[in-house]
Image (spheres, rainbow, N blue to C red):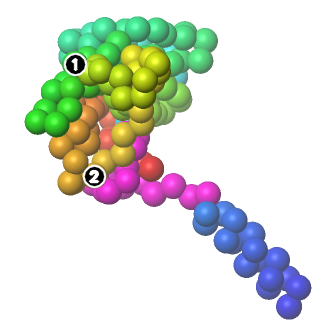
Amino acid sequence: MKYILTFLAVLICVCCQAQKQDTIIFEGASKIIIKNVNAAKDNFILAGKALIDNGYFIASKDGEFNQIVSDAFPIEGNAFRRGLVFYVVSRDNEIIITARTRRINASVVPGADQHAVNEPISYTKKLELSRVVFSRAIAYAKTLIGSIYFSE
């Protein structure tokens, strides 16, 4: 009985930490993962070139940790005006893209600097902002070589 309870406790802990991954976009997806066979440094160079080729600018990059942050790219819709920022992390055999938005309009909280805040965006069919952000992120991901997966 003791072993069964211990096994169930460990199983519950492992399942709680699991992240959903799928090749089809789903509600709550927040990352795009591109699986390929390249080394981390090659993926870093590939991701940087693809950002520039797609019209984005690189705000910062860290060659030691293979991370790139794009400059805010303006996107607009009926109810929003934001800057789209991509966080790209290159690893061996994968590139992870996380899209975030930065407010461009007037500050919502008095005295708060909204230009410095990058808000994470999860995919939701109902929100136009989410659809626009993920359509741009998917277009960028398709320019990279590899299989595309979506993750929480």
Where is residue 76? Give x, y as percent. 16, 27
Q: Which residue occupies the extreme right position in the image?
A: 2
Residue 9 lies, with reference to residue 114, above or below; the image says below
Q: Quadrant of the N terminus?
A: bottom right
Q: Callout 1: 10 Å neighbours few (<14), some, many (20+)? A: some
Q: Which mark is residue 74?
A: 1
Q: Give the quarter of the image for residue 133.
A: top left
Q: Identify the residue shown where x is 20% and y is 54%.
A: 126
Residue at the spot 36% in from the left edge and 23% down from the top edge:
107
Quarter location, residue 96: top left
Spatial separation of the CA atoms under disc 2 and disc 1: 20 Å
Residue 37 in view in this figure: no
Q: Is residue 78 visible?
A: yes
- 84 or 12, nearer to the observer: 84
In this rendering, position of residue 74 left or right of residue 59: left
In front here: 92 or 53? 53
Q: Is residue 78 magenta?
A: no
**Residue 60 place in picture, x, y as percent:** 46, 9
Q: Which region is colored magenta? A: 17-33
Depth order, front residue of 148/132: 132
Q: Is residue 102 above or below residue 142?
A: above
Query: x, y percentage for residue 49?
Result: 32, 11
Q: Which residue is mark 2?
A: 124
Classify 10 Å Cα crowding around label 2: few (below 14), some (14-19), many (20 and above): some
Per the picture, the main secondary structure of the magenta-coloured stretch is: loop
Nearer to us in this view, 19 or 92: 19
